[in-house]
Amino acid sequence: MTITHLTLSDVRGDVTAGFSTLTGSMEASERNITTIKDNIEEIRTLGVRQSEDMQNLSASLRQRGLYKGSVWDIVPGDIHIIAPVTRSLGKYRTVRYQDSYCTIENSDTRKVIRKYQTSGDNRENTMKQLDQDLNFLMKQRFGFPSLCS
């Protein structure tokens, strides 16, 4: 075997190793792209579900007559949280919440806002809890009178 044969053999080995590495990188990139596409689709699906939930909630409130000066459509950016008030005991509830004092754009009075958080795919229980809380708060007329005064 001559030096030329040895050199060509080494070059061939290097090229083969390079192509193997390149192929592996391309396959990893394709997997990452697929994962990103799946994540985008999941985000779109969640957005649609959230929009549907808000439409259902709005329709439910209108049907029950709760929009008469008590409940408004508020953009989250218009809410400015001042300080936390209460929070649920997370280990005993499937739907957790936190109440906070806040101000809302174009309003001079402080309000109490309740932020709900659910674990997993527990949307139905969250909506039931929200419905129960709205029934209670609307019967009280102004929510938590001792906290709002």
Image (spheres, rainbow, N blue to C red):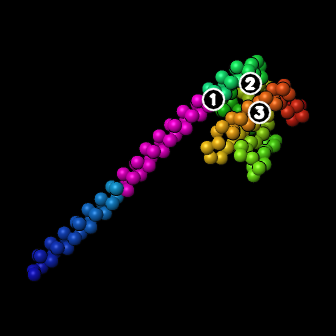
Work out whether 59 lies above or below 13.
above
**Mark 1 belongs to which amino acid?**
Met
Return the disc, 2 or 1, that comes first in the chain's sequence: 1
Q: Nearer the viewer, residue 100 or 90?
A: 90
Which residue, as the protein is rendered here, is positioned at the far left? 2
Return the disc, 3 or 1, that comes first in the chain's sequence: 1
Return the disc, 3 or 2, that comes first in the chain's sequence: 2
Q: Which of 53 and 110 is in front in this view?
A: 53
Span highlighted in magenta in the image: 28-53
Which residue, as the protein is rendered here, is positioned at the far bottom? 1
Residue at which label 2 appears: 71
**Could you tell me which residue is drawn at 50 percent across and 37 percent down?**
44
Residue at which label 1 appears: 54
Is residue 3 left or right of 50 when viewed as pictured?
A: left
The label nearer to you, 3 versus 1, is 3
Q: Decide whether residue 48 is among the magenta residues.
A: yes
Is residue 64 left or right of 85 when viewed as pictured?
A: left
**Mark 2 belongs to which amino acid?**
Val
Q: Where is residue 18 in the image (x, y as percent from the top left)?
A: 27, 64
- Element carrying mark 2: loop
Q: Where is residue 1 in the image (x, y as percent from the top left)?
A: 10, 81
Residue 132 has which mark? 3
**Mark 3 belongs to which amino acid?**
Gln
- Element carrying mark 1: helix
